Structures are given as C-alpha cells and as structure tokens.
Amino acid sequence: MKKTVFSLVLFLLVISINAQEETVTDTIKLWTKKGNISLLFNQSAYNKQWLGGGTSNIAGNFGLNYDFNYKKGDVVWDNKFIAAYGLTKIKGDEKIAKTDDRLELNSLWGKKAKGEWYYSIFFNFKTQMDAGYDKNDVRLSHFFSPAYFQFGPGMWWKKSNNLSVNFSPATAKLILVHGHFTEFGPSFGVLQGDTSRFEFGASISGYYKINLMTNVSIENRLNLYSNYLENPQNVDVDYQMNVLLKINKYLSANIAVQAIYDDNSIQAVQVREVFGLGVNYGF
C-alpha cells in the first residue's frame, strides 16, 4: 500500500529546474545575455488491483533557451539558441521512446534605416540530436539528417525587444539528409538518390512576447516560408508558443506548444505539446 501511495504521489509530481532569466551585460555594455533551463520529470505506477486502467511509465524532458544579443550605435545583432530533448519509458516495452528532440539557432543582424526599421540579414539553422524511429522500428532520421538552413537579406521592423517582424523576399533554403534515407524514395523533401534540396523564396518571421499579468508571460514565434521555385502557394508554417507562469519564488508552470506544416515532409500539421510544473532554480 505504501508503495502504491508513493507511486501515485510521484505521478502527480513534475520536477522542473528553471534558470531564472538573468541578464548579464559586459563592461562595455555591448552584449546582453539571458538563459532559461528546464528539466522536467514525471512518473506513474499502478498495481495489479488498480481498476481504473493505466500503464506505468517514466519520462523526462530537458529544455534550454539562451539569448545573446549585441547592440552598438545603429547596429543590433540578436541571437537565440534552442535545445530540447525528451524520453519516455513505458512498462512492458523494451524501447525508450523519444518525445522531443530539437537543436535550433536563430541569428538576425540589423542596421538602422529609419525609425523602427532596419536593413537586415538573417540566418536560421535547425536539426536534431538523436535518431528517430517509426512504430516498426524503422529509422527515419538522426543527427544532422535532416538539417535545415535559411539565409537572406531583408527589412526588419523592431518595435521593441518584445515585438518584431523580419521580411526577407530573397531567402535561400537548404535541406540536407543522409543518402541512406533517400535510397528507396524521397525524404523530407529531398528526392530519391539525392542528399540535398535547394529552395529560393520569401520568408517572414515574427516574435511577440506579452505579459498577461504579474508572473504570467507568453512568448510567440512564427516563421512563414514560400518557395518561388515550386508550388509557391504552399506556405511552410512553424509556430511556437511558450507560456511561463511563476507561481511563487520556488514554483512555476511551463507550457510549450509547436505546430509545423511542411508539405515536403508530410501533408499534415505536426503538433507537439509539453507541460511542466515544478520548482525554480536560479544561477
């Protein structure tokens, strides 16, 4: 009985270690840095007499968001690094399943043109850290396969650090995959027998952060891309939302939602959601 009660308590406990957003500015005040780390755990267990149904499992998720921004005169350079990784183990299943896996770098350089407008150049890189499998244990992806690169000049409207939109009408996009994923057919938009795909089109990326009330903030990121060279009406969409609720000095809740549409990968909307409730740790 004690073991069952203990397991049920663990089921309700999600431990989160969040680095409090800390701004560090160097002595000449050119760079501003801040980061957030989250480590989420959850576990559930049921004995044979439990009639409500359920399968014992254990899971963990790691997340890192790090900003390092530069400003000198009329030149600004904003950078953001994102890493996320999650695993889950279900009782009776020998496999450990991956629930999240992301590596992403966003870099945006701007030189003031007039008012809130900047001439800009942006760079985006996305890949994953570990291999991904389907339900039949067929490997679908691994580190740097696929890997996505976007680069292009444009105009950047920056109202504040919490609201900005970048327009790039001449964006180059490169997709890389290993040859063993395209040996028998296309993969992630790369044609059979190829290891890369080049696209040229237009990109729009937006950022909006709002503080709903004391200790409650919502961060939104949206990226749209249209390929001039093939089906420009099919716009790729990548939307990310992060909600942070600071309950008190030690407790917080985090909700992360991402929705992706890329018809080169799959003609459907991909959605992931992560929720965590736990304690804060500042450094």
Image: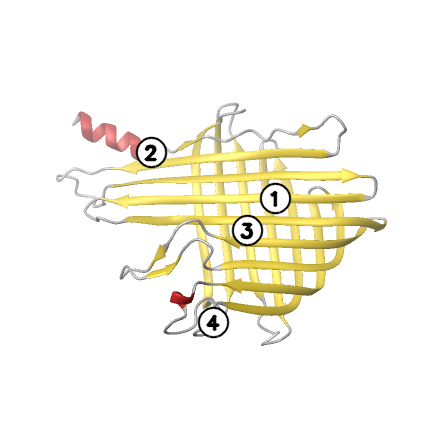
Question: Between tags 4 and 1, which lies in front?
Answer: 4
Q: Position of residue 126 (x, y in %)?
A: 53, 54
Q: Nearer the viewer, residue 228 or 261?
A: 228
Mark 2 or mark 1: which comes first in sequence?
2
Q: Quadrant of residue 20?
A: top right
Residue that carries the numbered disc 4 in the rendered image: 194
Q: Quadrant of the N terminus?
A: top left
Distance Cα–Cα, label 4 vs label 2: 48 Å
Residue at the spot x=47%, y=49% of the render? 102
* Of residues 237 and 249, the one drawn nearer to the viewer in this rendering: 237
Relative side of 108 to 74, left or right: left
Q: At 85% across and 48% down in the image, what residue appears?
A: 115
SS at badge 2: helix
Q: Earlier in the sequence, mark 3 or mark 4?
A: 4
Outermost residue to the right: 114
Q: Earlier in the sequence, mark 3 or mark 1?
A: 1
Residue at label 2? Answer: 12
Q: Nearer the viewer, mark 2 or mark 1?
A: 1
| Tag 1 residue | 80
As drawn, 153 above or below 219? below
Mark pair 3, 4: CA separation: 30 Å
Amino acid at dot 1:
Lys
Q: Say what secondary structure mark 3 lies in.
A: strand
